[in-house]
Image (tube, rainbow, N blue to C red):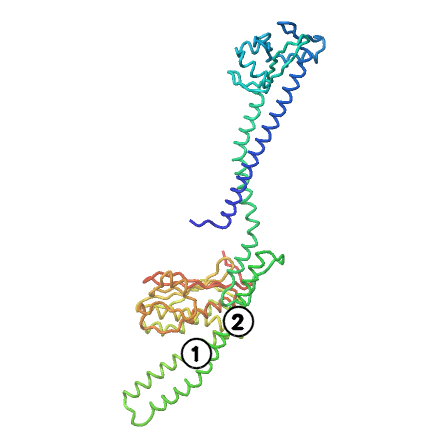
Amino acid sequence: MTLTLRTRLVAISTIASGLLLTALGVASYDVLSRHLDADLAQRLAELTDGLHGYLHFDDDTASIAFDASDTDQAAFVHEATRYYRAYDAATGRLLVESGGLAALALHATPRDVQAFRAAPKPFEISTRYGRLRFSNSVRTSADGRTYLLQVGVALEPMDAALARYRDLLLWSVPVALLVAGAAAWWLSEFALLPLSRVAVAAQEIDVQTLERRLPTRGVGDELDQVVDAFNGTLCRLEHAVGEMRQFSAALAHELRTPLAALRGEIELTSRTFGSSPAQRDRCASQMEEIDRLTRLIDQILTLARAEAGQIRLTRAPVNLTELAVSLVEQLEPMAAAKSIDLRCEPLQAVMVDGDFGWLQRLLLNLVDNAVKFTREHGHVVVRVTREDGTARVEVQDTGVGLSSADARQAFERFFRADPARSPSTAGAGLGLSLVRWIAAQHRGTVTVQSRLAEGSTFTVTLPLRRDAPALAG
């Protein structure tokens, strides 16, 4: 599955944000843990050093002397002696122990005491009430005897603080990722807005409007570079298509004279005295083919001039309803010859601003096309209506229809559907291209809906004349 650019941007941004938040969370947790541990170690050292001033050793006894009336001293001694004990460093005998340690029954052996005396380093121990950290310090009395003092502090506050911070990270990181994803989705719309505008502008450019160029923002960024490259491609394409149009127009123009001369010679031959009926039939068939080529050349010249902007349309009020009725009346004999029911269903007067001759040609091409591709005893209906401020002309037939693929290409130059469905018709595939050009010159559109063996409906929409009367009722 291929993700859209916006989705990929959001995904990459969210993943990057997630990695960054995770890294920051791990780093901040480690920093907090180190700072809390350092603060605890400093506090333990302060308690140990302070307790040295209040603790006195006398032979086999140890006592703490302080001024109970001094609240600061009392509070300090209370905190320092919560977890403490003293040993005779020589024998390993326990001299004094706080009630908190006595309840935990944590006793050191004489060997442990000797080891702590030799290397008085802090150590930690786990109990059923949490972890404790102890300091080891050696004191020497006036009589030369040595004692080991251990002072402890609880690590539970630090562990609880780290646990709460860890839980906060575990909850906040997913929430932050959701917020980051939503923000990335919202911001990506603004980031891709210039690209969307370029895409919309590019979609409006076709072979008829190659002179247009995509707008640049003038900031010289990557998007402007892409737009400049695309505009350069459009310039080269416009030049190539212009040369092709000039070539086709020049070729068509040069072919008109020899075709006219050739037709005259064939017509003269057919009238020569002594020509057999078979010769005259062959001459007539050849003249029909030359006439078909002449019509094709005229269509190519007309379309080439139209696409080159050499045709100027006049603007005047045109009653589409009257135009459709008149045209249907003119084509009824041709439709009757094929036993086709051709009729017009005008619902109301519909006025537009346009060129009468070219609008007539638009309707003529559509109706003529419908009659050609409708079998005997079929129906062709022309409807002229108004809807939502636009004029609509529908040409509906019960002909051979078009496949969905053919319908998408119906208005391309020289496109012809499968001739096997209607072998009796002949055409160059230029009529509908001219219809699209005429509609575009009148600021309108033409579309087709069709199904094989069921018929087609061509719909032309044009802007209504501004002072056109509103519908009654």
Q: Measuring from the top left, give residue 393's x and y in whole percent.
A: 45, 64
Q: Which residue lies furthest to the front in this view?
A: 144
Secondary structure beneath label 2: helix
Query: Could you tell me the amino acid type at mark 1?
Result: Ile
Position above or below: 190 against 249: above
Neighbour tally class for label 1: few under 14, some 14-19, many 20 plus, Cα within 10 Å: many
Closer-to-camera residue (32/312): 32
Query: Could you tell me the amino acid type at mark 2?
Result: His
Closer-to-camera residue (22/303): 22
Q: Say whether residue 90 is left or right of residue 258.
A: right
**Where, by quadrant of the figure, is residue 160 drawn?**
top right
Label annotation for residue 314: none
| Of the image marks 2 and 1, the number of the one nearer the N terminus | 2
Position above or below: 435 against 51: below
Q: Say whether residue 81 is left or right of residue 67.
A: left
Q: Which residue is drawn at 63% across and 24% down?
A: 39
Q: Measuring from the top left, give residue 172's x and y in whole percent.
A: 54, 33
Secondary structure beneath label 1: helix
Q: Residue furthest bottom?
A: 273
Label annotation for residue 297: 1
Q: Measuring from the top left, give residue 260's x and y in whole percent.
A: 42, 86
Task: State the count of labels.
Answer: 2
Closer-to-camera residue (179/399): 179
Q: Residue at label 2? A: 239
Q: Measuring from the top left, give residue 301's x and y in whole percent.
A: 47, 77
Q: Say whether residue 37 is left or right of residue 327.
A: right
